[in-house]
Amino acid sequence: MIPPSSRQDFDALAHAALHQGPRSPRALLVFLGPALVASIAYVDPGNFATNIQAGASYGNTLVWVVIMANLMAMLYQTLSARLGIVTGRNLAELCRLHFPPKLVWCMWVASELASMATDLAEFLGAALGLTLLFGIPMFLSMIVAGVITYAILELERSGFRHLEQLIALLVAVISICYLLELLIAPPDWADVGRHLIVPRIPNAHALMLCIGIIGATIMPHAIYLHSGLTQRRIVPRDAFERRRLLNFSTIETIAALSLAGMVNMAMLVMAATVFHHGYSGISEIEEAWRTLIPLLGKAAASLFLIALIASGISSSVVGTMAGQIVMQGFIKRHIPIWVRRVVTMAPAFVIIGLGYGAGPSLVMSQVALSLTLPVPMLALIWLSRDPKIMGAFRLHGTWLVVACIGAAIVLLLNFLLVAQSVGISIPGLPSE
């Protein structure tokens, strides 16, 4: 728990900052935290896997998907944060209070499955990075990653600011690594710009990667988490403070997810630059790392692994936090952190024990996430538009339309994926 004096000091500083306005840099720093923590979910190892495959197979063709998914993520994360600030409750709690019990249980099961798929990608990514960087067995790497993750989660006992600062440091590590990668292997920015504004899906395999990119970018657990991080972090005392807090939250969300979006784009364009011509068949992280060594040198390959480890460990921490919020919100149950870590790590041990590769497992986990994504998206839209819940801050007008269009795009892509998987041909979309 947070020591009373620390909590009181933070509250005093936060309320003073609310009255200074967004022009004060110090005020912005006080509110930096929730969106930054949530944003780590947008640069997790699942993003590495899908972006590497997309860049290697199709060059910069699918870079528009990364940007579209990131813009959608900004909207839904902003709505999630608003929900927590205005109501003082998180998304899962509001679902339990306003939806039928049977629907709530179904939503909880879907959300727990999404959490397991999330942790599979994050945990495998961290362990794979440790194995490749230090040459230790995969099972040992998984144990090390689990211990590190649990140790970081325990840091929250000394105050949420310490955990936020550590997550911010890990985000900085990932960002710097990819900035250096782009300096080592400069992309064709004209080609990147062209594909940013000309959407195209070449074939059915590219469609699966598009859905995987969306699943890896707009994360179901991050939508639940953001509302939980903001619900009681700063409690506004009046309407003025609430509006000012919402403004700060929106600024932070846009900034944090812009950074995450740039990192995602850097992943894809680096893979396009290095692998597309001559190594387009690369589909796994390990294969990409081994190919980087002769092409760009050991330094570039090491930067790649450092970013992967930082991504896997930090996103695994955030995923566990989200899982606790989901369980407490939907069914009012709490389990010890170590129990949740063991349960969510188990599928990764099973997959590796059965001999399946980490790369394909990472991509398919992101497709699974995309299939469960409509659950929190639709719930968030439904609750945010209700004036009885949100009052004057309800979602309406143009932004309600935009939010519904975003959900419709995800549902359409999921329908196309299911149709493809059962052998239904999609007009105008070749299979290869």
Image (cartoon, rainbow, N blue to C red):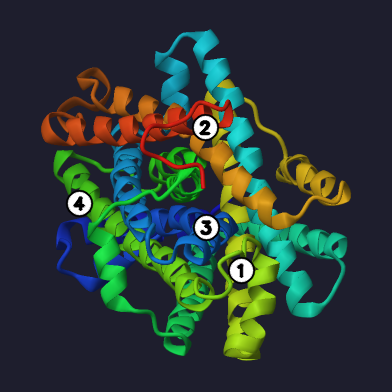
C-alpha distance separating marks 4 and 3: 29 Å
Between the C-alphas of marks 2 and 3, the distance is 22 Å
User: How many marks overall?
Assistant: 4
Disc 4: which residue: 247
Is 47 drawn above or below residue 227 in the view shown?
Answer: below
* Amino acid identity at mark 2: Gln
Q: CA distance from mark 1 to mark 2?
A: 31 Å
Residue position marked by numbered label 1 in the rendering:
308
Q: Are marks 2 and 3 in contact (CB under 8 Å)?
A: no
For the question of whether residue 101 can be seen, the reply is yes
Kind of residue at badge 3: Asn
State the residue position of label 3: 47
Q: Quadrant of residue 305?
A: bottom right
Closer to the camera: disc 1 or disc 3? 3
- The residues bearing labels 1 and 4 have C-alpha atoms spaced at a distance of 33 Å
Above or below, comparing residue 40 to residue 310 in the picture: above
Dots 1 and 2: beta carbons under 8 Å? no
Q: Position of residue 409 (x, y in %)?
A: 33, 35
Q: In the rendered image, which residue does mark 2 sit on?
A: 420
